[in-house]
Image (tube, grey):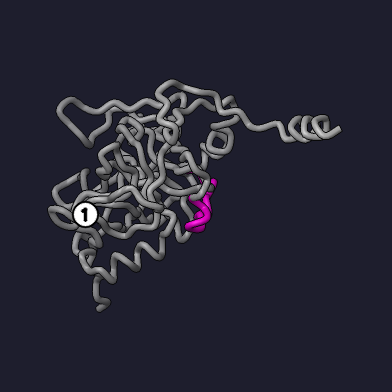
């Protein structure tokens, strides 16, 4: 019998963090943990659209576990957030984890400084659709509490099953086949990556361990990112507007790229 990894053990936590260095914690203005995300380039973090309802202000990179984070070289200010234009998310009354309708639950977070990829390598992003993930073993990774104070990176394996709601578009669903094989402590990972092998193929829609289809089957819903490849690559094609938080300017500004040719000609003119 193979010994199970103890999610509270520091060696296990470090091992998960080293295996998935691109997984980040999304924080609010008070530096409290809100959601999980995935670095996809030097300034952009992929997460769920639902996570963007939170007042996200910071991205914490290269951390395995924390009690309270302070602003340091591994904490990046968020400049801009973008949710899919046709995002729709409706919960049942008096429920935090049962969606009547969920469509295009995907979002992006852009940091002020383009340094994310200099700290960690980004993962491989898969463009599979939900039909190609039949009977797949999927791994969800993300942050969640391991005791009353400490939040740590955790993971869990799910077996792909049919979703119970046809109003969840571009989604796959999974169950934990054996509750005795859990590798997490409590609810975790909302907005974090879902992997097929070493390839990111989805986003965790609800905190892991927050849903069930029976008294014994723990269930979750994952947004498949393959159908959103074009949107992810072109989400910032239009003129970008963001709050310049480094300068503490509250009004929205256009991001203007410098015209280097114009500057070069201007310098030549000055020295003639």
Q: x%, y% of residue 168? A: 36, 33
- Vertically, is 140 above or below 191? below
Q: x%, y% of residue 184? A: 23, 59
- Vertically, is 183 above or below 33? below
Image quarter of the N terminus = bottom left
Let me know if residue 124 is in the magenta part: yes
Outermost residue on the top side: it is: 251
Q: Nearer the viewer, residue 52 or 195?
A: 52
Query: Can the viewer see residue 24?
Result: no
Query: Can the viewer see residue 7?
Result: yes
Horizontally, is 243 left or right of 167 in the view? right
Outermost residue on the front side: it is: 271
Which residue is rendered at x = 51% and y = 25% of the image?
241
Which residue is rendered at x = 38% and y = 55% of the image?
138
Q: x%, y% of residue 195? A: 42, 54
Q: Nearer the viewer, residue 214 or 22?
A: 22
Which residue is rendered at x = 27% and y = 31% of the image?
99
Let me know if residue 149 is in the magenta part: no
Instruction: Give the SS element for disc 1.
Output: loop
The region drawn magenta spans 116-129
Q: x%, y% of residue 60? A: 36, 49
Horizontally, is 238 left or right of 16 in the view? right
Crowding near pointer 1: few (<14 within 10 Å), some, many (20+)? few
Q: Quadrant of residue 21?
A: bottom left
Image quarter of the C terminus = top right
- Vertically, is 82 above or below 174? above
Q: Which residue is mark 1?
A: 67
Q: Nearer the viewer, residue 111 or 40?
A: 111
Q: Nearer the viewer, residue 51 or 97?
A: 51
Which residue is rendered at x = 54% and y = 33% of the image?
231
């Amino acid at each position: 019998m193979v010994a199970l990894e103890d999610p509270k053990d520091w060696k296990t936590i470090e091992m998960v963090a080293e295996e998935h260095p691109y997984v980040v914690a999304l924080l609010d203005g008070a530096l409290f943990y809100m959601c999980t995300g995935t670095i996809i380039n030097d300034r952009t973090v992929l997460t769920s659209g639902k996570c963007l309802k939170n007042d996200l202000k910071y991205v914490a990179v290269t951390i395995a576990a924390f009690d309270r984070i302070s602003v340091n070289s591994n904490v990046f200010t968020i400049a801009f957030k973008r949710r899919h234009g046709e995002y729709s998310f409706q919960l049942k009354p008096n429920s935090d984890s049962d969606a009547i309708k969920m469509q295009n639950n995907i979002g992006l977070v852009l940091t002020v400084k383009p340094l994310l990829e200099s700290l960690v390598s980004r993962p491989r992003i898969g463009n599979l659709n939900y039909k190609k993930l039949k009977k797949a073993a999927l791994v969800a990774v993300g942050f969640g509490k391991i005791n009353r104070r400490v939040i740590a990176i955790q993971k869990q394996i799910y077996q792909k099953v049919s979703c119970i709601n046809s109003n969840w578009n571009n989604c796959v669903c999974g169950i934990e086949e054996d509750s005795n094989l859990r590798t997490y402590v409590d609810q975790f990972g909302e907005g974090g990556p879902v992997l097929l092998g070493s390839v990111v193929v989805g986003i965790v829609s609800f905190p892991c361990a927050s849903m069930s289809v029976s008294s014994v089957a723990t269930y979750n819903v994952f947004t498949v990112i393959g159908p959103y490849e074009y949107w992810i690559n072109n989400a910032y094609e239009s003129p970008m507007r963001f709050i310049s938080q480094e300068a503490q300017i509250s009004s929205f500004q256009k991001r203007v790229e410098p015209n280097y040719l114009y500057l070069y000609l201007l310098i030549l003119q000055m020295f003639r």
